Image: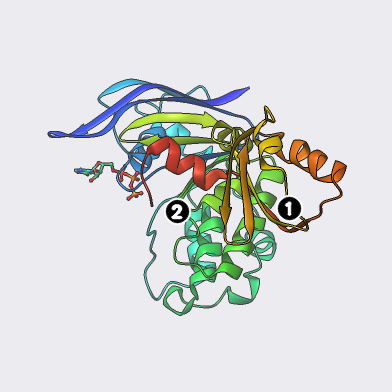
Amino acid sequence: MSVIAISNLRKTYGDKVAVEDVSFTVEEGEIFGILGPNGAGKTTTVECMIGLTKPDGGTLEVLGLNPVRQQQALTKYVGVQLQEASLPDKMTVAEAMELYSSFYDDPADIDELLQDLGIQDSAKTRFAKLSGGQKQRLSIALALIGQPRIAVLDELTTGLDPVARRETWSLIERMRDRGVTIVLVTHFMEEAEHLCDRIAIIDAGRVVALDTPAGLAMQVAAEQTMRFIPSAPVDEAALKALPEVTSVSHDGDHLVIAGNDTVIQAVMGVLARNNIVAGQLRVDQADLDDAFVAITGKNR
Ligand SMILES: Nc1ncnc2c1ncn2[C@@H]1O[C@H](COP(=O)(O)OP(=O)(O)OP(=O)(O)O)[C@@H](O)[C@H]1O
């Protein structure tokens, strides 16, 4: 079941087209990633989705509500953690949670949520004294206090060290396990690959690809490259004659063979029949990073 449906969304600021034409749907219970270069229109898209920004064109429906006309109703069901969210320096974690919880008719239990997110020991700590990781946990807690059905997280792990980032990932997974649908805007390929069920790549205000992380990688995975040092001279003409092989070249002692997704089995078969061992074998397969670069045509 779709919980978010965006169709031909358009938003301009004066002459500047922030979102040209964006359409996608988000299914209940999934982690949906929005990926794209700087200035692609990701934040504008999610701001329109939650009713913070009024679109110039297109239709949006979130949980059956219109974000423009029914924004107030929508806030009950959608938890939001936007870029650079900040609280007064002197406000403690517990005070922030109480303040936010007062906005909702049926808020989550504050102690339970803090415990779940591992910041119960910081309940009396003031915002200014929290570490980057603790601030992120608090922002997740605030996004969840209203027991939302959808959580929108924009650049949640930017600025976090790798350990804190991985901890945040497991929090996001726990959120999903509670049944919350998650829309995640991210710059990190690894994060999208690890967490997202599906990803929309947005470039220059348009969706240029939409698939699972593996599906996106597959779009550019037609070619694989294997490199190895053969234990004895190889009949290169025989390798080149294989239908799976597109090229055979040398890099020092290494033989470099490119081909389709079954090239490895084909080459290994020839080597085995000739009692040749492939030393220091390395296979390079296209990943989401390659897909992103290929799809957007931009190196990041
Ligand atoms: N309030 C605004 N006024 C004018 N231009 C804006 C405004 N908000 C966004 N833009 C422009 O619209 C374009 C899309 O911005 P947006 O913030 O949606 O991109 P983004 O993909 O989220 O980028 P980033 O990854 O850098 O956060 C950018 O060129 C941006 O400068």
Residue at the (64%, 71%) spot, across then down? 120
Measured as percent of width and height from the top left, residue 129 is found at: 46, 80
Q: Is mark 2 within 8 Å of ligand 1?
A: yes
Q: Nearer the viewer, residue 219 or 165?
A: 219
Q: Nearer the viewer, residue 258 or 6?
A: 258
Q: Could you tell me the amino acid type at mark 1?
A: Pro
The quadrant in which residue 212 appears is top right
The residue wearing badge 1 is 233
Residue at the (63%, 61%) spot, across then down? 253
Q: Is residue 277 left or right of residue 102?
A: right
Measured as percent of width and height from the top left, residue 26 is found at: 55, 29
Q: Could you tell me the amino acid type at mark 2?
A: Glu
- Number of labelled discs? 2
Going from N to C along the chain, the mark reached first, 1 or 2, is 2
Q: Is residue 149 left or right of residue 52?
A: right
- Is 55 situated above or below 258? above
Image quadrant holding the N terminus, namely top right
Measured as percent of width and height from the top left, residue 236 is found at: 67, 42
Quadrant position of ligand 1? top left
Q: Nearer the viewer, residue 264 or 10?
A: 264
Mark 1: few/some/many CA within 10 Å (<14, 14-19, 20+): few
Q: Is residue 79 visible?
A: no
Disc 1 from disc 2: Cα separation: 52 Å
The quadrant in which residue 240 appears is top right
Numbered badge on residue 11: none
Numbered badge on residue 155: 2
The nearer-to-camera label among 1 and 2 is 1
